[in-house]
Image (tube, coloured by chain):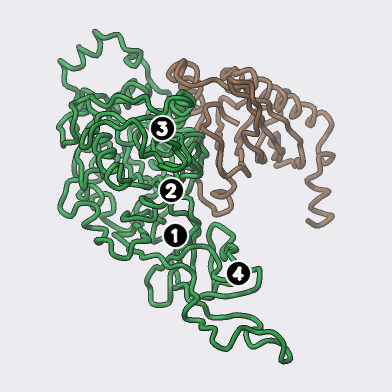
Chain colours: A brown, B green
Amino acid sequence: MSDQVRSDTRLSSVSRDVRDQIADLQADYIAALDSQDMKGWLASFDENNSSYFCRSKENEDEGLEVGYMFDDCHERICDRVKFVDEIWAGTFEEYQTRHFLQPTRCKSLGEDLYSAQTNFTVMYTDDAGITKVLASGCYDDEIVVNGVARLRSRKAVLDTNVVPRYMVYPI
Amino acid sequence: MDARVTGGMDLNWPEPGVCDAVPYGVFNEREVYDREMERIYQGPTWNFLGLAVEVPNAGDYKSTFIGDIPVVMTRDDDGNIYAWENRCAHRGALVIRDSCGSSDGSHTCVYHQWSFNNKGDLIGVPFRRGLGGNGGMPDDFDMKENPVRKIRTEDYKGAVFGTFDWDMEDVDSYLGGDSVVNGHVKRIFNRPVKVLGHARQYIDSNWKFYAENTKDPYHASLLHLFHMTFGLYRSSQTGGVRLSNDWNSVLFSESGTDDEKAMEEIDDAHLRTFQSDYSLEDMSLLAGRAGEWNDNTTLVILSIMPSLVIQQIQNTLAVRQILPKSESEFELVWTFFGYEDDDEELTNIRLKQINLIGPAGMISMEDGESSVICQQAISRSRNARNVLQMGGRTPEDQDHLVTESTIRGFWKKYRELMAY
């Protein structure tokens, strides 16, 4: 990466105020998921227009769109909340997650839209109390920032090409 | 008697020919697993290796497994697909180390740079004549006698199978020739396919718990609440099961065909599966495109033993490859596909409906878990037996979905191959 590109996408290339709002969004997002609060997860997305994709790096690198989760509109994100909270309820073994994030890149896309890249590691703890790594990867986001930050689109790309067991909750 | 000596022969098997129960020892004993790798995976079976379109050009390769044995499939200049064990003929290192790629037609082991062609023949040995008169291979060393271990392959309508048994019948016969089972294979592979992507999950369970699951139409409306809730699949629908060569099977159904009396019985039973009144914000997930195959079939699960599941659920198409890793672990590899001639709208329908399947799938997430909780439960149950009597006690074709008939077929063939 050239020095020019690096400086244009450094976190410091956007204002402290914007960075704070994005940091709040990221914190709210993982706090919601780590307390299995799907409605809180939903609240992180722009209700007018948003999408969520969770896919493996293997597919991403090949330019294949297939995802573990493919929510290409806000309605589908709402439906995912309903699946987990109501339809699947009581049928899967619940597991505790812990998300750990590290922002790496941020850039203005004009007006109130920003792109951001954030590394993540997600640990999970099963009923037996054993903790393992669920996934490691990077969020590739477009974020609307106007007093409050909301996800316009989130792509969670998992380096973890083989996931343990199964996934109920989004990453 | 010590199980290590008997390899599962001393398990509490029912009388010969009885297949409505099996002892749990088959699911958690290393000796049974080792015997499976010998008698099933290296025995008279065809194992799925991949889709032919995954190696479109000469020199392309894909590494995968037959059982837990690493293998490679490659396409040669002659247009045919070959496969061989991914073990250098020299000292045993992996020849191919990545999951797929392209080559110039030679595959070189990194360790001592022995190289092999697409067919697995040895074509290069560095320092074969020595260096400055020193070393080198003996004069009688014959390149032709040192290929990698070759695997017989067949590209069957775009699905590539491999076997270590060079005397095997062809794939068409293995799938049952004119059988309904093979008819469903031909229906799905009726024109050129294109890969949409992959998903992989590692499941702490014996591979056979999952194999049973894929042959079980009875669990689908009880475990998979999404199916039931939105009427994609209910045990009350038109459907059935068919067998070929005992252990290959298909289960199929048509959504929207619920038998009213059966629905009332489901309602009366107060099963947790029956929830009405749900609707989706985005109904396009379920809308899909009807009549893609000029029939009313909305669900097809083909279980081709020992390693392959081919599925159509609504408009989704996938092959699932079952890769045993130990007696209590397997990896499940999903390859999602569509057809080469799909229009953009249909591709989008498939991408969206893939939400239903895979490791986070609305109707397949639970299969991973059900296999795990079976494995967890049987730690000290080697001679206790399960119960496989839904829909009768024998393997047979049936015109309904309330059955374990196809699981009985699996165990019938399994006992035969394993000589239990």
Circle 4 residues within 10 Å: few <14, some 14–19, many ≥20: many
Give x and y (percent) for residue B358: 45, 38
- Answer with mark 3 or mark 1, whichever residue precedes in sequence: 3
Are discs 1 and 2 both within one chain?
Answer: yes
Between A147 and B299, the one nearer to me in the picture = B299
- Chain hosting mark 2: B
Circle 2 residues within 10 Å: few <14, some 14–19, many ≥20: many
Residues under labels 1 and 4: Cα distance? Answer: 22 Å
Q: Which mark is residue A75?
A: none
Q: Which mark is residue B54?
A: 1
Q: Which residue is mark 4?
A: B109
Amino acid type of the residue that numbered disc 2 sits on in the rendered structure: Thr
Q: Nearer the viewer, mark 3 or mark 4?
A: 3
Residues under labels 3 and 4: Cα distance? Answer: 39 Å
- For residue B134, say whether it is visible: yes
Q: Which residue is mark 3?
A: B25
- Answer with mark 1 or mark 2, whichever residue precedes in sequence: 1
- Residue extending farthest to the bottom is B133
Amino acid type of the residue that numbered disc 4 sits on in the rendered structure: Cys
Amino acid type of the residue that numbered disc 1 sits on in the rendered structure: Glu
The reply to whether the C-beta atoms of the residues labelled 3 and 4 are less than 8 Å apart is no
Are discs 1 and 4 both within one chain?
Answer: yes
- For residue A72, say whether it is visible: no
Quarter of the view holding residue A43? top right
The reply to whether the C-beta atoms of the residues labelled 1 and 2 are less than 8 Å apart is yes
Circle 3 residues within 10 Å: few <14, some 14–19, many ≥20: many
